[in-house]
Image (cartoon, rainbow, N blue to C red):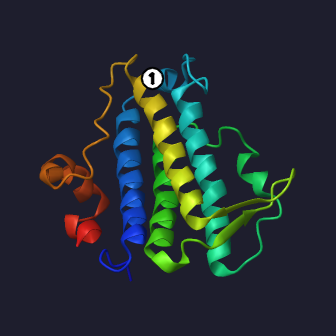
Amino acid sequence: MKPNPHTDPLAHHLLSMAYNNAWANHRLLAACAHLSPSELQATRCNFFPSILATLNHNLCVDWFYVDALERELAGDAPHPDCYQFFAVEQPFQTAAELQREQAAVDQRLRAYCAAQRDGELGRIVTIARPGGAQQDSRTRLLAHLFQHQIHHRGQVHAMLAGTAVKPPQLDEFFCAGEADLRATEFQDLGWTEADIWA
């Protein structure tokens, strides 16, 4: 059961952010699928050295935080070796593989957000980092995860400008009047506007 926008407005907003996150990843990775392998791996001026490296980083960070969120929700102990999600710096070498794996973790994140209620968002999630435990509320950890994705999607978006692939519009998700601009992706993803906003 999804949070009620009238009784759980913050939880519903976080769920809409999870949908937005998945939609933006889908749109961006669909664009990246048109890059040649050399374009995907080309060294560029960025925090990470290539589009491929940046997309892999986003995915690994999602694995890291979604695992922590799911463990706390289930009442399980923090992951004993949370950095295992970064053991391989670039686990995937093609846009198709990245799109598949990103969609899978995005689905997990949407399911997590769909289980939230406003009164539970202050619960503490613990990540057993080697230098000391990180402890944040569910709200703050989710906000960080969404911001991290936005940050690195923006970098990929900028790097696409140096290729023959047109960078996709990534700000057409929230306004009701722009439903037609996201309709193709919603159809691809099997969603309707009512799934998110009703």
Answer left or right for 29 relative to 52. Answer: left
Q: Is 136 located above or below residue 12 in the figure?
A: above
Type of the residue with mark 1: Met
Q: At which x and y percent is residue 132? A: 85, 55
| Residue displayed at 21% across by 64% down | 193
Q: Quadrant of residue 165?
A: top left
**Dot 1, crowdedness within 10 Å: few (<14), some or many (≥20)?**
some
As drawn, the residue found furthest toward the bottom would be 1
Q: Quadrant of the C terminus?
A: bottom left
Residue 115 seen in the current view: no
**Quadrant of the image for the N terminus?**
bottom left
Q: Name the residue at 45% across, 55% down.
A: 103
Q: Is residue 143 above or below residue 153?
A: below
Which secondary structure, mark 1?
helix
| Residue 172 relative to residue 15: left or right | left
88 to the left or right of 53: right
Q: Residue 72: image x %, image y %?
A: 67, 73
The residue that appears at 54% across and 59% down in the rendered structure is 142
**Image height check: is 41 above or below 122?**
above
Q: At 62% from the left edge and 67% from the top edge, which residue is drawn? A: 69
- Residue 192, given in percent of the width and then of the height, sits at 22, 65
* Residue 45 horizontal/vertical position (percent): 55, 16
Q: Label 1 belongs to which residue?
A: 159
Question: Considering depth in this image, is 10 or 114 the residue closer to the camera?
Answer: 10
Q: Which corner quadrant of the image does residue 79 belong to?
A: bottom right
Q: Is residue 137 visible?
A: yes
Q: Number of labelled discs?
A: 1
Q: Nearer the viewer, residue 117 or 68?
A: 117
Above or below for 184 versus 80? above
Residue sitting at the far right: 131
